[in-house]
Amino acid sequence: MKKYFSIVFLLVVFLLLNSCKSDNKQGTQQKDSIQNPQKTTVQKTNDLEFEKLISEGQKYLENMQLVKATDVFLKAIDVNPNRPDGYYGLGVCYTINCGTNRENCEKAIKNFDKVLLLDTAYRRVYYNRAICRNKLGDSQGAIDDLDLQISLDNTDPDYYHNRAVNKLHLGDTADACNDYKRSFELGNLFDKVSIDSLCN
């Protein structure tokens, strides 16, 4: 009994010490911001500049002005390399040009990998990386990414359609049919043609 009591006591002491370290760290951060108000002002300015650049990059992207979008997303990464938005925008720019240039596919994948180091559930990152992997001929890699994307959101027909295409590349017609059917159920009416020709 004494043995268990001493173990419990040590555990409680350990937890208290850790919580104190955490409180102390927060206290130090508050103290720093009181002693150095410029620190928070600079951070706010950087955040505003970052958001402005991301918004600007997205507008260029929507208008297919890819060179301008790429430049702006690179500037956003310079302002804050610890947020995924800039890498994601850059990755999408490279993905759009992926079909004509293998090097762009590889650049896109590198940027999506950076996004995932910062946020494993960021937007459509696995889906976009899957598109690049497909264009590089890596159908299994594309399927793996689409599996992950579907685990985060199973309501988008594009994910199932693209997974079906990759499964078909690997000769897995039965599973491809299941995905085409699911894509059709979710609203992709064009997949009816694939279902009629492959799945009956």
Image (tube, helix red, strand yellow):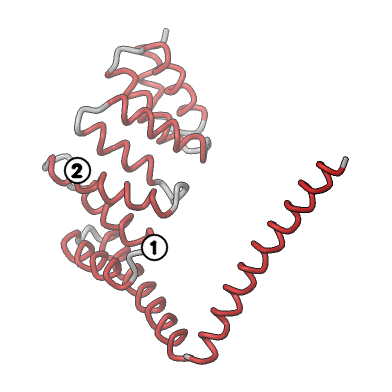
Task: Please name the amino acid that badge 2 sits on.
Answer: Glu
Quadrant where the C terminus is found in the figure? top left
Query: Quick one: SS at disc 1?
Result: loop
Q: Residues within 10 Å of mark 1 (few under 14, many from 20)?
A: some
Q: Any mark on residue 106, and which? A: 2
Q: Residues within 10 Å of mark 2 (few under 14, many from 20)?
A: some
Please provide percent x and percent y for residue 199.
Answer: 41, 11
Residue positioned 39% across, 48% down in the render: 116
Looking at the image, which is closer to me, 119 or 53? 119
Quarter of the image for residue 192 reads: top left
Q: Is residue 154 left or right of residue 17?
A: left
Determine the CA span between mark 1 and mark 2: 21 Å
Contact flag, marks 1 and 2 (Cβ < 8 Å): no
Quadrant where the N terminus is found in the figure? top right
Residue of label 1: 83
Please provide percent x and percent y for residue 185.
Answer: 51, 28
Please provide percent x and percent y for residue 45.
Answer: 39, 83
Task: Please name the amino acid that badge 1 sits on.
Answer: Arg
